[in-house]
Amino acid sequence: MARMKDKYLALKAELQADLGIKNPMQTPALEKIVISVGAGFAMKDNKLIQNIEDTITTIAGQKASTVIAKKSVAGFKVREGMPVGVRVTLRGEKMYNFFDRLVSMALPRVKDFRGVPRNGFDGRGNYNFGLQEQLIFPEVSYDSVMQIHGMNITVVTSAESDKAGFALLEKMGMPFSKGSN
């Protein structure tokens, strides 16, 4: 079993008591993690899109899919059917393994890291944040990268409020920044 899942099961009772939840089934848990890369800069370069897809697949441990434009938008020079991004949704064991690698290995490698911002919650307990580059993950070698790109990571929880989502992620080891920003 994944180390983070064991950690969650160990702290579930404590989290339930802290949040004042009577029913253990209402205790917040991780549901899924979505990693996405907007690759508008690489729309015309299929090799670059493929490289981004391979990189995200390596990071996530699961095949990433290319996102195709549904409509043409002249202002962005996007045509229907063009690749505009890459995304992967992680659930279950792979989600916990990725979260463990993110918290314990990748985020500490960020230069001048002071924690992830506290204001990334959406009002329903889900947390969103962005990373500037993919090279913070130890699985990615510098030689295999054609272009440095960032990514958005969404952590979807079963929490019904930001307070409960924050408590869950903080207890699971997410390094939030100090203060109230």
Image: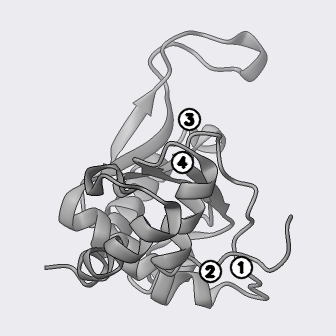
Question: Which amino acid is tagged 1?
Answer: Gly
Please tell me whether residue 84 is drawn above or below residue 4 in the rendered image. Answer: above
For label 3, count other residues whose C-alpha is less than 10 Å away and answer few (under 14), some (14-19) or many (20+): few
123 relative position to 158: left or right: right
Which badge, 4 or 1, comes first in the chain's sequence?
1
Q: Nearer the viewer, mark 1 or mark 3?
A: 1
SS category of the residue bearing label 2: loop
The residue lying at 46 percent from left, 47 percent from top is: 49
Residue at mark 4 to residue at mark 1: CA–CA distance: 17 Å
Residue at mark 2 to residue at mark 1: CA–CA distance: 5 Å
The residue lying at 46 percent from left, 56 percent from top is: 52
Q: Dividing the image into 4 quarters, which one contains the N terminus?
A: bottom left
In this orientation, does residue 115 appear?
A: yes
* Residue where numbered disc 3 is placed: 44
SS category of the residue bearing label 1: loop
Question: Which amino acid is tagged 2?
Answer: Pro
For label 2, count other residues whose C-alpha is less than 10 Å away and answer few (under 14), some (14-19) or many (20+): some
Question: Which amino acid is tagged 3?
Answer: Lys
Q: Are marks 4 and 1 in contact (CB under 8 Å)?
A: no
Question: Which amino acid is tagged 4?
Answer: Asn
Which badge, 3 or 4, comes first in the chain's sequence?
3
Please tell me whether residue 51 is drawn above or below residue 136 in the rendered image. Answer: above
Q: Nearer the viewer, residue 34 or 16?
A: 16
The residue lying at 50 percent from left, 81 percent from top is: 173
Residue pushed farthest left? 1
* Residue where numbered disc 4 is placed: 126
Q: Residue 27 in the image: x percent, y percent?
A: 36, 57
Q: Which mark is residue 175?
A: 2
